[in-house]
Structure formats: C-alpha cells, structure tokens
Image: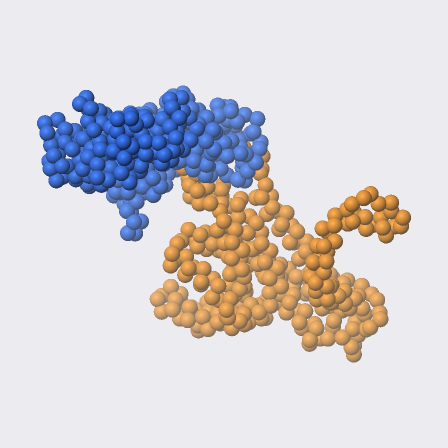
Chain colours: A blue, B orange
Amino acid sequence: MSDIELQNISKSYGDLQAVDDVTLSVRDGELLCLLGPSGCGKSTTMRMISGLETPTSGEVYLGGENVTDQAAYDRDTSMVFQNWALFPYKTVLENVAFGLKMRGDGADERSRRARDMLERVHMDGYEEHSTTDLSGGQKQRVALARSLAVDPDVLLLDEPLSNLDKRLREEMEIELKDIHQEFDKTFVYVTHNQDEAFTLADRIGIMNDGRLVQVGEPTEVYRNPTNRFVEEFLGDTNFVAGEVADVDDRYASLSTDFSETIRIPAFEPVEPGASFTISLRPEFMSIQRATGADSPAETTARADGTGGDTIGGTVENTIYRGSRIRYVVDVGGEDLFVEQSVADQVGIQEGEAVELGWNTDDLLMFHPDGSRVGAE
Amino acid sequence: MSVQTPDSVLDRLWSPFETQSGSRRSLFLMSPLILFELLIFVVPFAMLVRISLSEQSQSLPYAEGTFTIASYIEVLQSGFLQGIIVYSFRLGIIATVLAVVLATFYAYATWRADGLLKSALLFSVVLPLLTTLVIKTYAWVPLLAPNGTANNLLLAVGLLSAPVQVVPNTLGVVIGQVYIVFPYAMLAIYSVLSTVEWELVEAARDLGAGRARSFVEVVLPEIIPGITVATIISFAWSVGAYSAPALLGAGSDRPFALEIQEQMLLNFNWPIATALSTIMLVLMFVSIVLIYVVLGRFGGDVSNAA
C-alpha cells in the first residue's frame, strides 16, 4: 500500500503562505503531476510528502500511516531533485549504492543492485566515473537510478527534466513513463511544464498561490477547467471580456470591449448587464479569407443559425511555429490569435481580411472573479 | 614559434620557457612577490641558519666567522630543550583538535542559520579580531583566575567546593590558544562550507542517512579543503604559541617561542636560539606536509569503496 493522503496541509514561512490548506489523495501506483507556475507551492507540497519539510498544520499519510512528524530518512519515499543533487565526491556507483549503504546492505548486495539500476537507466559502463564528468541527461539518469535503488514506495520527482533540452526532455518523458509502468510505484511529479504534465500524468493537480485549484485526468482538466487560472495556464487562449446585452431562449449576446457582440450560450446566471469573460481557444477557431460579400471593415459577429459564429478582422501578423502557424488577427482594435496546421494553410498573408469562426457551444465562460460559469 | 637550434647550455636550459611565451610573462608578473620573499624570508632565514652554525661566544651573541654544528647537537641532546619541543607540539595538537572541532560545529551552525542569527554568529567570530591579541588574552585572567569571575560564580552556585586553578595553568594556555586561533579556523571552514549545496544533505537524508551520517558522508568530504587550511593555521600558530603561554601559563608552560626569546634576549646565546628555530621549522614543515597528505585522503578525490 503506498497511497498518499494529504489532509488540509499548510506551510507558512513567516508571513509567506507557501501552501494553503491542500487536501489531496494520490492513488496507489498512480503518476500524479503537480502543475503550476513557479512559487505556487507545488515543490513545498512535495517536500512535505518526502519529510524534508514539516507542515505548519495538517497531516500527511503514506499507505494509511500518519507520517506527519516522521523525518525524511524514516519515510519510504525517495526524491529526484531538480539539480540532481548527486554526491560530487562519490563515483556513479557509490551514488546509486548510497541509499542501500545507509540501509545497511552488504557491499556485494548493494554493488549488484546498483549495477542493475544503472543498467536499467542505460548508464552501465559509467560505474567508476565521477558524477561531475556527466552530461545533464546522464546525471538525470543516475539520480533516477539512485532513487529507484532503495525501492521506495513513493517516488517524488521535483522538476527533474527542467534542466534538459527539449529533445532530451521528450526522450526522458517516454522513459519515465516506461519506468513508472515497470516499477509500478506511486509517482508524484512536480512541473511547471504543461506538455510534460499532459504527457506523463494519470492525473494532474493544478496549483496556484499555494492552493490546489483542480485535480483530474488530463483530458478532464483541459476540457473542463474550473476557473480562469486553469484555462489560462493549460494553454494559450484569447480572453474576451464583455457585458450581456440581451438574452433569448438559447443564446445571449455579449457586447465586448472592442465594440463587437459575441453570441454566448444562455446559462442560468446570464442576464442583461452581467459581466463575463469568454475564452476563445485557438483550436476551436477556424480562419478563412473573408468572403467578398462583406467589406473588410465589416467586423460584426454574425450568427449563421447553427450555433456557429464568425467575426471579421485583418491579419496583423503571421508567426511560424514549426508545424503550426499562428495568425494574430486585429478585430476592431483588439488582437485575437488563431492557429492552423501548416498542412492546412491556404497562404493567408499579413494585411488580408479574414473571417474567424467558432461554435458558440465550445465557448468557456468565466465570472469576473475567475470562476467558471456552469462548472460542476 | 619556430624550432630552435640550441647552441649553448644556457639556451637549452631556457628553451622550455621559450616555447611558452606566457611563462615569461607570469615570471615578470611574479617578480615583485619573488623579490619580496627573497628580502623578507629567504635572506634573513639564510642569515639565521648561518648564525646557528656558528660557535657560541662568552662575550658576543655568537662568534663570527666560525663554523660548527655543536649547537644542533646540544639542542638534540638536551632533555630540557627536548621537553620544550614536546610541550610545543602537544599544545599544538590539543589546541588544533579543539579549535577545528569547535570551528566545524560553529561553521555548520552559521551555515544553517539565517537572517539575524547568521549575522550575529558571523559577527561574533570577527569581533575578537578587532582587538589586540594581548588584551583579549589577558582578559582571560580576571575571568579564570582562582578568585576570578568564573570561579566565584561556580562557588556561589555550589558547583565547586574549592576554586580551580585554571590560570595560570596549562588549561588556561589551551583555552587561550584555542580562543586565539578559533576565528581563523572557523572562517577557513565556513568559506568552503558556504559553497556546499544543502540539497546534497537533503538527498542523503532522503536516502536514509541520519543527521550525523549525512554530515560524515556528504558534508565532510566537501569541506576537507577548509578543514585542512584551518588545521594548518591552528597548528602552526599553536606550536609557535607565545602570548597565551606567556600570559596564562604557569612556570612549567614553556613552549619553544618563550625559550628562544630567553636565549636571544637574556642569555645572548644566538647559536642555540637559531638552531632550535631551524629544528622547529623543519619539524613544522614535516608536520604540515603530513597533515596535508592525511586530510587530503578523506576528500577532494573520488574513493573506490562503493
């Protein structure tokens, strides 16, 4: 049993509230990513699981046992540090064997097991090397082997890949996923990188300002963000603020800051005069050249009667981002961006009049306080 | 640079330097230092060695123009002077071990402290350096004397039934000497310790090492260079201790510095004083090489015991 239960844990340093009343359960054998911007308390939360920090209040359970007051060296967790924290005066093999030595295993036993682990992370042949000679990726593998060698119930990874270049990081992501499946341990993985979280996680816990904002499977949190922070953090999007003008039975119209009206679904709290922010995700929007019927200056959003909505604008900028092109479109003085796969592009140039289209039912709406309209 | 055809012995000796134009430049840059060392250390030391090889004289400090090793033989055969050498080294070893151990703890505490406490710990180490050695050494007398503050306090509380003679006594000398070298030892260790990443200790603890074990396994190998410097400073200074034994010691507390002073200034026996100095210098040199080699084994390189 190696599930983790955090019950109302908080951690403060003087006036600074690093972690604020976090309750979270990590299932046995699960890979949970704690995702959030730097300073959001995700690392502190993980350090409280490892025992390197003691919560100011709240309790930590590992496998049903209350370990809140147990020191790090008594807990059956092992941590992979962001800067790897390899012991510089020890060889690669000694580093990997360290935990086993502390546990009191015999020299032969720990050497054998350390060699196995190094082989598992493809670092065999480096046993007698000094850790200072290794590249970042190699250090990462050694740190991983060192943590896995003690066969911990829970493996904690603190932004382990953030110091690696993109290609290596993606390679290691796949490898970590393999290792997670092979060793069948509970992993808690801290990162600020959304792609990493989406690639690796069974579930994602999103943190902001010391609080746990949302926990769920990757598709769930992406499709159903509970508030504006999550929506903003998980991917680039266009936020448009406005006030409800009028409401009919299915849709309402929102008059926006850039003197456009956009059709929105008429949920319960939607009534004239209420303020909302809507998220126009680039992947929900299509872009095409403006049809000749409208003059380029005509930018009123129009409903086509099927739930679709379009808005006219002028392309201000096109940015090539490898396999995708991002168009920055000026709509009545406000910039919106939309992306298209390079394969689908039709050669829209800067300065051209375009139409952006989307389905009204895809819109995500947020109250002025950031909470989602119609969530839960 | 083209290949040279050396035509004289001098050219051949010089050629290794020629191939690296940088070494000539560094020699030039080092010349003030070399000159300084020559004038301040090498020349006077050569004079000192020369005097130690002169005959002793009744009317003069030494007999000029004579040559003998009699003074060396005398120093090595005299039980009294051997006792002085042994005393010096014993004081050196005891004071060094105490100072380095205390300094390591203190440096560790300073490293782990933060904010005001860290500043206070650092400041209180540096503060004694602002006072002259004699005054701060003398300050121990009213504190540790049989009718001094410490004894009076302990007697009043009832922890002592009779005053303890700490000063003037060997214990007082050790306390005074540790006090003198402690700031230097602490700063030498702290300067290295402050560059160690705390994360390494966390990693060790996370892997099951307790507090003491994580210090020995992870911190100690890293701070060996600092400990080596602290040991050498403390040892060299304590073997050559002068003010602590002079001010806090009893009559039997005679390290070689006091003896040399007496031979030089009271007995006007310069050959004995200089011969004793030279012997101590050689012994010190050997000791420091030994310290360096022994401590160097514990850190600075990767060992092979997995």
A237 vs B108, nearest the viewer: A237
A194 vs B139, nearest the viewer: A194
Tell me, yes or no, if residue A203 can be seen here: no
Is residue A200 toward the left or the right of residue A9 in the image? Answer: right
Q: Residue furthest right?
A: B7
Q: Residue at x 47, y 29 (%)?
A: A167
| The C terminus of chain A sits in image quarter | top left
Kindly indicate the quadrant of the structure image that contains residue A41.
top left
Q: Position of residue B99 (x, y in %)?
A: 52, 57
B256 vs B252, nearest the viewer: B256
Q: Residue at x 66, y 71 (%)?
A: B261
Quick check: B150 above or below A169? below
Tell me, yes or no, if residue B46 can be seen here: yes
Q: Position of residue A37 (x, y in %)?
A: 34, 39
B134 vs B219, nearest the viewer: B219
Q: Residue furthest bottom?
A: B59
Is residue A267 toward the left or the right of residue A122 in the image? Answer: left
Q: Residue at x 16, y 39 (%)?
A: A243
Q: Position of residue B252 (x, y in %)?
A: 59, 68
Marks counted in the figure total: 0
